[in-house]
Image: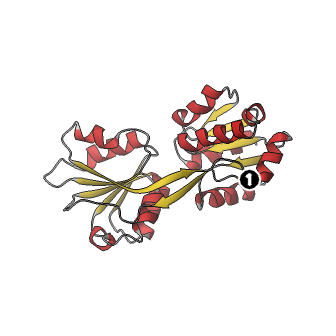
Amino acid sequence: MRLLVTRPEPDAERTAAALRSRGHQVEIAALLRIESVADAELGPGPWSALVVTSANALRALESHQRRAELLGLRVFAVGRRTAAAARAAGFLDVMAAGGDVQELAQHIRREERPGRDPLLYLAGQDRSGDLAGELAAEGWIVVTAVVYRAVQTDRFPPPVTAALAAGQIDGVLHFSGRSAQAYIDCARAALLLDQALAPSHYCVSHQIAQPLAAAGAKNLRIAARPEETALLALIDSEG
């Protein structure tokens, strides 16, 4: 199949490489650009543990002036890939939990007890779900520090525009609701909405598929679990 990956770099190229190794042709349209918040305010501390829902938070932390004082903390991470990124960043006590915010919250409830020191949630500017609110309602104190933001592009790369216009894209991979909405916005700007909605759309979760469904996409495919490996397995099953 000829597939389009819409997630930000560097994850887009890693996903593209996995797809190419499976024999697919791949185009990349990184519709969001991740920017670190260099002067992100973390609060005074101390903290009982860190919470991260994306490897982007760990990349942003690499250049933060207070990184060293966080390295001794336990890390609760969404998914195995984010957990691996935490270990690569130098954290030793890392716990991976599921593939979404709800599963992470459940894992924290099992492994941690509300205490005097808060959890420090290293987050993006735009978030799906309310992890801090969920935990706060049950007695945890959660400090949310915005350490990165996603900036949306306003158009597809020219080769992607041409491929969509010619009906040459068989499937599109979507990893966030924000990037799915960016895909729709870019399609409208290019006057290619019908052509952009026609391929199969492979989504990590039902929530991520919602903007596509609202725009009129019919060929929606949802991964069995909200993680990349499950999405690739879904594509393998249909390839």
Residue 215: percent from the left, percent from the top? 64, 28
Other-residue count near label 1 (Cα within 10 Å), few / some / many at <14 / 14–19 / ≥20: some
Q: Is residue 183 above or below residue 67?
A: above
Residue 175: percent from the left, percent from the top? 57, 45
Q: Nearer the viewer, residue 87 or 132?
A: 132
Tell me the residue at 26%/58% (across/down): 49
Q: Residue furthest left?
A: 116
Q: Is residue 14 above or below residue 113?
A: below
Q: Is residue 82 above or below residue 205?
A: below
Q: Nearer the viewer, residue 119 or 190?
A: 190
Q: Answer yes or no: is residue 1 visible.
A: no
Residue on which disc 1 sits: 157
The answer to which image quadrant residue 14 occupies is bottom right
Tell me the residue at 21%/45% (across/down): 140
Q: How many marks?
A: 1
Q: Answer yes or no: is residue 229 visible.
A: yes
Q: Residue furthest right?
A: 166
Viewed as shown, does residue 166 lie left or right of 44? right
Q: Please, what is the three-letter code of the amino acid marked with disc 1?
A: Pro
The color scheme shown is secondary structure
Tell me the residue at 65%/60% (across/down): 13
Q: Nearer the viewer, residue 157 or 102?
A: 157
Residue 228: percent from the left, percent from the top? 57, 49
Residue 10: percent from the left, percent from the top? 59, 62
Q: Secondary structure at mark 1?
A: loop
Tell me the residue at 68%/37% (across/down): 201
Q: Quadrant of the C terminus?
A: top right
